[in-house]
Image (cartoon, rainbow, N blue to C red):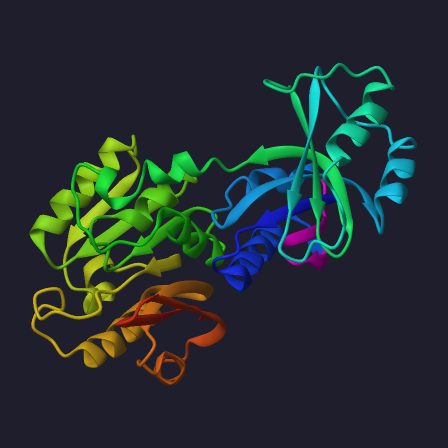
Amino acid sequence: MLYVRILGSLPEMAVDEVRAMLELGGGRITGRDYLLLRIEADEKAFPFLDRLGLSHEYGRLLIEADSVEELLQKAREVDWPIRGTFKVDTETMANCRHRTLDLPRKLGAVIHSMGFPVNLSKPDTVVRVHCGERLHAGVMLRFFDPADFENRKAHRRPFFRPISLHPRISRAMVNLTKARRELLDPMMGAGGILIEAALLGLKVYGVDIRPEMVEGAERNLRHYGVKDYELRLGDATELKELFGRSFEAVATDPPYGTSATLAGRRRNELYREVLRSIHDVLKPEGRVAIAFPADFRAMEEAGEVDLKPIARYYQRVHKSLERYFYVFER
């Protein structure tokens, strides 16, 4: 059994991202305690769980208990998969209903009594206890360091544009398409989505109607060591003519407003034409993850071009921008 602790900012999007990766790697979500997901999967799922963007960590889930006493009793019966030294950390979620102040010391003493050495500063193994409605104890396998994502935020790239998705969200959009080999961003801007997709090992294809964006996106991709990419100057409403081929996955964050970013076209008309164009180059059962302002009737417009809605997720960015992230399937 495994666990994944997701971020709290877009929780339903995070859950579906985990589910999408388990559909690729084998496994399923069998339970949830606020931000902690119980996962039934084996090691074949690890490379796909390693792709996650909207999660804090994942690991092996060894104990679930309804009290501290029950957890400590079960801990004495567990064959702990600890290599080298260890320490115990607790993570108190918003729905925690247990007193965990002394739990690291008490659980650490139980595990130490089995012969495992303690190192509180640089442990080889972290034993993690999550407190929610229940107590969940396990061994952390992967921590998604926020600094890695921060280093890829818009202001850290050589070609900077202030309006850009957070890299975690970009990565989640890629994962929600369930892409295995390739991904197209037909309105790539500075290339944030392409960067995340490429770092997951996908070949990336990008399009933008502005020459400076094509040049800037290439600078950004090279900055992060990406070599397998193909960028084109062109119109997102003419993808079939531009490529003459189909793609397994598409992810994009279209511009939301100014005449410059919309190339002089009316916003809603542009969005409709982009959806039609994406449909024309998407393989059967291929998926697109796309963001739109909340006032755009994306579900209806996607239906008009035979894109089936899979999910949508609401986000309030600031007082003048509310948006939805959508997943559609051909």
Report whether residue 239 is seen: yes
Residue 32 is one of the magenta-drawn residues = yes
Determine the image quadrant of residue 45.
Answer: top right
Q: Position of residue 217 (x, y in %)?
A: 19, 45
Q: Nearer the viewer, residue 295 or 275?
A: 295
Q: Quadrant of residue 61?
A: top right
- Point out the image quarter for the C terminus: bottom left
Q: Nearer the viewer, residue 67 or 328?
A: 67
Determine whether, in the image, residue 95 is placed left or right of residue 235: right
Residue 9 picture location, percent across and down: 48, 58
Q: Main secondary structure of the magenta part?
A: strand
Tell me if I can see residue 246 in this picture. Answer: no
The magenta segment: 30-42
Residue 269 picture location, percent across and down: 20, 81
Q: Nearer the viewer, residue 309 or 39?
A: 39
Residue found 32% across the figure and 35% down from its top: 151
> Residue 237 magenta-drawn?
no
